[in-house]
Amino acid sequence: MSITKRNNAAKAALVTAALTIAASAAHAGTPYVFMAIDTTQHGTDILKGQYEEAIARIRQDGASDLGFSESTNLCIAYTKSGDTTSALESCDLAVDIARETNGMRRFAHAIAPYNIRRKNLDLVIALSNRSVVHATAGEEQLALEDLREADALKPYLRAVSKNLAVLTESTAR
């Protein structure tokens, strides 16, 4: 998939949907928030709680060339399906793609300014989602690192501040 195609998929990420997830036993009953890309059919599957269907659809449609929305939604679907290893692989890919496309945006928009809130949106979504996977796997320090980086990018997304508050509260116990 070209960077342009990934970038367009990432722009579609401006419309996200929050999903709450109950954390691991260490955080039982504590809601974290995922951000799914709901502008795709697999995003719709995730919103409906059809995680296996979303995984199958993504794997069938884009098995060899996953973009930002696919890897982001796989991160969520695998987590909700209990496959932490695959979830982290998908989250890592989403972070890598977001970092790559953010670099291209900075280059492409060096001449024409653009909305600073949107600049890092994809990366913030990917980092926040990966933090949820880390938190639910009991890896609080890694989750905190991702959330601090996401928060420092000033995305103005409630999910980041909510996840940071939940994690901070749960680690203070």
Image (cartoon, helix red, strand yellow):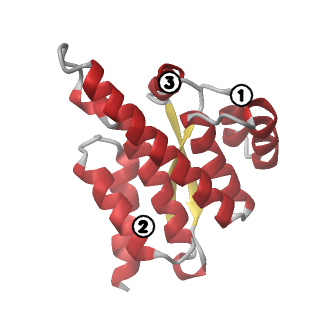
x%, y% of residue 161? 32, 54
Name the residue tied to disc 3: 12
x%, y% of residue 148? 29, 60
Amino acid carrying mark 3 in the image: Ala
Q: For residue 42, which quarter of the picture? A: top right
Classify mark 1: residues with Cα within 10 Å, few (<14), some (14-19) or many (20+).
few
User: Residue drawn at (66%, 40%), measured in percent from left and top?
Assistant: 47
Amino acid carrying mark 1 in the image: Gln
Q: Secondary structure at mark 1?
A: helix
Q: Secondary structure at mark 3?
A: helix
Amino acid carrying mark 2 in the image: Ala
Q: Pick the quarter of the image with the N terminus.
A: top right
Q: Of callouts 2 and 1, which one flags the residue occurring earlier in the amino acid sequence?
A: 1
Q: Pick the quarter of the image with the C terminus.
A: bottom left
Between the residue at mark 2 and the residue at mark 1, the CA separation in whole angstroms equals 28 Å
x%, y% of residue 41? 71, 28
Q: Is residue 7 depicted above or below 96 in this figure?
A: above
Name the residue tied to disc 2: 143
Name the residue tied to disc 1: 41
Q: Are marks 2 and 1 in contact (CB under 8 Å)?
A: no
Q: Is residue 48 depicted above or below 80 in this figure?
A: above
Q: Secondary structure at mark 2?
A: helix
Q: For residue 169, which quarter of the picture? A: bottom left
Left-right relation of 124 to 24: left
Q: Is residue 19 depicted above or below 65 in this figure?
A: below
User: Residue drawn at (71%, 63%), measured in percent from left and top?
Assistant: 83
Q: Of callouts 3 and 1, which one flags the residue occurring earlier in the amino acid sequence?
A: 3
Residue extending farthest to the top is 112
Q: Are marks 3 and 1 in contact (CB under 8 Å)?
A: no
Left-right relation of 164 to 8: left
